[in-house]
Image (tube, rainbow, N blue to C red):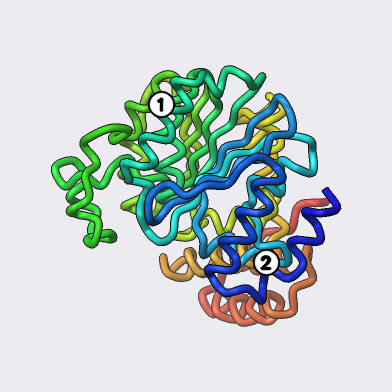
Amino acid sequence: MQAETDATTDLAALSPAQWAKRLEEIGDEAGYCENLGARHRVFFSDQGPVLLVTFETVAEIRARQPDQLPMGHAIAASRGWSSLTVIADGDTWFRDRAVYGYFDRLVDDAFFEDFDRVVFFGAGMAGYAAAAYAVAAPGATVIALAPQATLEPRIAGWDHRFAHMRRTSFSDRYGYAPDMLEGAGEAFVVFDPLEAMDAMHAALFRRPYVTALPCPTLGPNLAGMLDTLGMIEPMLVAACEGRFSAAAFWRLYRLRRDSVRYLRLLAARTDAAGRPFLTALVARNAAHRLSSPRFRSRLAQLEEVLAVKGITLPPERQR
């Protein structure tokens, strides 16, 4: 592990080609790192009987400081678990024959049967991939954040966000993500029901073996918000330890109560709905419980507005 630590210290200064070469060197020590066609690569670290499979992008990994290594590897390695990260260079939705062929080989080699527990994870297009490729590991736990079910125009033509993907096939192998989850042990789809496109995709995942976890007000960057709340790593650790459930998620989700950023989003939502009374309640909660000067000022403004209308806030509950 010392060699790996030394190897990662200067990754931030490397060019894309140098970073890819160094990632390959680190992967060769931990397990392997190899290209899958022109726009994908796989990084495998072989450490223990639990396997965390993540789908990530080059941009996301290179934004990680200071090591610029896959998130899945960082979480797993510190706990003696194995990790497998499929990395996309750009917005590919991991739709590539080389990626299909790689998972086919894993199935033929009974690769996933060597592990006591397997967890698949991804967000957005990577959430799509986590669900779609989980079919290769029956019994795996899948956690997908705001995933697309498909971008096949005949099914999801209403999703106008990814027009550049319209010519990419989502109807061949590993194509329709909800169907690929049929063999999963447990699958969890986390989404914001107020984001229309994300909610419509989540509805396509409605299956007996899928648990929907709707999280209003987290916004279009749901994964980023959950990361800000400090939830993603505890979720994955719980899943890898076999104790993740809807109840476990909702317990973690209470962290949002202590996030000024989340409370700002909530206040913006009630503001947009023209509900000054509710906005005042949010502002009071943040001002008093989190000692937020900005919310304290906002509360004073709202109390003046409500006083003109003859409205006063109810007494605060005793904490």
Residue 312 percent location from the top left of the image:
62, 67
Residue kind at label 1, given as amino acid type: Leu
Q: Is residue 232 left or right of residue 220?
A: right
If you read the primary sequence from the N terminus, does the residue marked by circle 2 or circle 1 appear first?
Answer: 1
Give the quarter of the image for residue 314.
Answer: bottom right
Circle 2 is placed at which residue position? 260
Q: For the residues carrying marks 2 and 1, which lies nearer the camera in this image?
A: 1
Residue 278 appearing in the image? no
**Residue 206, above or below 170:** above
Q: Nearer the viewer, residue 283 or 116?
A: 116
| Residue for point 40% across, 56% down | 39
Residue picked out by circle 1: 181
Judged from the image, the secondary structure of the residue bearing numbered disc 2 is helix
Q: Residues within 10 Å of mark 1 (few under 14, many from 20)?
A: many
Query: Mark 2 touching mark 1, by CB under 8 A?
Result: no
**Where residue 287 sits in the image (x, y, percent)?**
73, 70
Q: Nearer the viewer, residue 125 or 83?
A: 83
Res 81 → quadrant: top right
Judge left or right: residue 255 versus residue 280: right
